[in-house]
Amino acid sequence: MVRVYCAGPLFNPGERAEMDSIASTLEQSGFSTFLPHRDGLEFAQIKPA
């Protein structure tokens, strides 16, 4: 399966929501996605925003 790195601005809730929407659309089309604010920041796992 192809994994897509979703890169884009993540500076405010609106930008994060837009990236979530893009990732969701890709996932519904059969892609696996990596979204930094959802999947990759270890600090976010320690202290969620």
Image (spheres, rainbow, N blue to C red):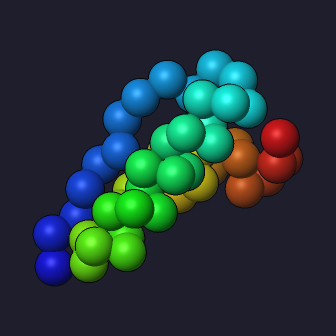
Estimate the x, y position of residue 22 in percent, counting from the top left: 42, 50
Q: Quarter of the image containing the N terminus?
A: bottom left
Decide which of 33, 25 is in the foreground and name it.
Answer: 25
Determine the residue positioned at 40% across, 62% down: 25
Decide which of 43, 28 is in the foreground and name it.
Answer: 28
Would residue 28 be found to the left or right of residue 19 on screen? left
Determine the residue positioned at 82% across, 48% down: 48
Would residue 10 be found to the left or right of residue 47 on screen? left
Decide which of 24, 2 is in the foreground and name it.
Answer: 24
Q: Quarter of the image containing the C terminus?
A: top right
Q: Is 29 rendered above or below residue 4? A: below
Q: Is 46 rendered above or below residue 24? A: above
| Residue 22 in sight in this render | yes
Q: Is 16 rendered above or below residue 20? A: above
Determine the residue positioned at 37% across, 70% down: 27
Would residue 8 be found to the left or right of residue 31 on screen? right
